[in-house]
Image: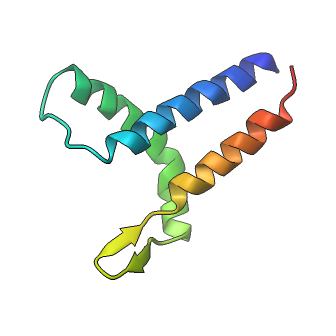
Amino acid sequence: MCVLRYLLIVYEIIFLIRVFSSWFRVPPSGPVRTVLGFTRTVTEPVLRPLRNLLPPIRTGAIAFDLSPIIVFIVLGILIGAIHC
């Protein structure tokens, strides 16, 4: 069970990198682009179904995507539920 907990923590870190990287401009090529492409590839299969179920909330010209918040909550519950 500890291995699963550690894998969830690593996934949470990868997910956090994905969220923070969405706030900045990404270079068109290079190692940063490769790492961020990996984070997108790993996290998108979890986010896409949530986005289909829960569309972004529009507030004027800005839309808030709530799917990352839901994923963080679920990951936190799962990590907390697994005791090692």
**For the image shown, how many numbered marks are present on the structure?**
0
At 75% from the left and 34% from the top, the residue drawn is 79
> On screen, 1 above or below 81?
above
The image position of residue 81, as x and y in percent, is 84, 37
Q: Please say which color scheme the image uses.
A: rainbow
Residue lying farthest right?
A: 83
Image quarter where the N terminus lies is: top right
Which of 49 and 69 lies nearest the eye of the viewer?
A: 69
At 54% from the left and 47% from the top, the residue drawn is 46
> On screen, 66 above or below 58?
above
Left or right placement of residue 83 versus residue 37 in this view:
right
> On screen, 70 above or below 15?
below
The image position of residue 58, as x and y in percent, is 40, 78
At 20% from the left and 38% from the top, the residue drawn is 26
The image position of residue 19, as x and y in percent, is 42, 44
The image position of residue 36, as x and y in percent, is 32, 32
At 36% from the left and 29% from the top, the residue drawn is 38
Residue lying farthest left?
A: 28
Image quarter where the C terminus lies is: top right
